[in-house]
Every structure is written in C-alpha cells, then in structure tokens.
Amino acid sequence: MNHDVMTEADKVLEVDRQIRAGGPVWCPWCRCMNVPNKPQCCVAFQSCLDDRAAAQLESVIAQQKAIELGQADAIVCPYCTQVNRAPEPGEARHPSDWKRPLVSPFCCDLLQAAVVAVIQRKRTEDYIRHAGKIGEAVDKAARN
C-alpha cells in the first residue's frame, strides 16, 4: 500500500484550499477540525494562518504599488482571487455596475479593508515625514 505524505507546502496549500471553500478547516499538522471564530488547534496551524494573512497583505501592497507606478492596471484579490480594475477614464461606473452592486467597488470586504489600510498607512507615513521636516525647519530657525 502506498501512502502519500504531505510536505509542508502541501499542508499550507490544503489549508488555503479549505479556507477558500469556507466552513470548518481540517488541520494537516495535528488532524483536528478548526471552526471559524474559535481558538486554533495548534501552533503550526496558527502560524500557517498568520503567514497566509501576511502574504495576502503584502500581495495587496505590491499590487497597489505597481498600479501607482503604472506597471499594472488591476489588483488580483488574494482573498477571493477576483480581478479588480479601475474604470477607464471617462467611463461612468455606476454603483449598480460594481462587482457587488451598491455595496462596494471591490470584490470583497477583505480587499477593501486591506486597500484602505494601505492607503491610510501611506498617508500617515507622509504626515510623519512632513512633521519631521517642519520640526527640522523650526530647529534651524531657532539656531539662527
């Protein structure tokens, strides 16, 4: 009898597949069932979830930066895998035309929250940089 042994990469892919399907998730490390909004079964499973979340956010950050640099024109959602494009210039996009009509122009709430968080973080960094320049100017003026 031949039994396949899951590699670490296979285990991560299996967790991702189950999460995308929704509902309970079987842990390939300790073989327990995990139910949404309940404590996780083991450290390996929690670590997998944390790594997955970090990779998804990094994907949003990288794709948004590519759009700002003109290297891309869409974000492929790392949460639900749908493609999100901005409307063409002059193209009227009525809220009824959105992927989720009258709810959000983004494909899912997770992508919307990630994009908003990335934009807010960038603005905060700009404000901090600007405040630092003001502080330097005040210090320079005080020395003169």
Image (cartoon, rainbow, N blue to C red):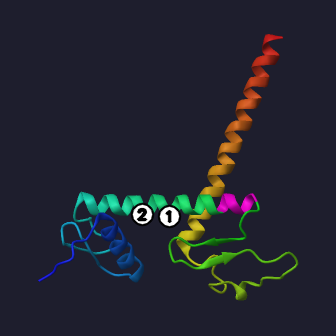
Q: Quadrant of the C terminus?
A: top right
Spatial CA span between label 1 and label 2: 6 Å
State which quadrant residue 4 falls in. Answer: bottom left
Seen in the picture, residue 106 relative to 140 is either above or below; the reply is below
Amino acid on which disc 2 is placed: Arg
Label 2 crowd (10 A; few <14 / some 14-19 / many >=20): some
**Residue at the front extreme, as displayed:** 1
State which quadrant residue 81 falls in. Answer: bottom right
Label 1 crowd (10 A; few <14 / some 14-19 / many >=20): some
Amino acid on which disc 1 is placed: Gln
Does the segment drawn in magenta span residue 29? no
Left or right of 88, for residue 28: left
Contact between marks 1 and 2 (CB within 8 A): the answer is yes
Residue nearest the viewer, comparing 14 with 87: 14
Residue 61 on image: x %, y %? 60, 58
Does the segment drawn in magenta span residue 65? yes
> Count of labels shown?
2
For the point 29% across and 79% down, which residue is it? 24
Residue 56 has which mark? 1
The stretch of residues the image draws in magenta is: 64-69
Residue nearest the viewer, comparing 26 with 6: 6
Residue 125 on image: x %, y %? 66, 44
Residue 6 on image: x %, y %? 25, 71
Mark 1 secondary-structure assignment: helix
For the point 28% across and 67% down, which residue is it? 7
- The residue wearing badge 2 is 52
Residue 16 on image: x %, y %? 39, 73
For the point 26% across and 59% down, which residue is it? 44
For the point 15% across and 81% down, which residue is it? 2
Q: Quadrant of the N terminus?
A: bottom left
Q: Main secondary structure of the magenta part?
A: helix
**Residue at the left extreme, as displayed:** 1
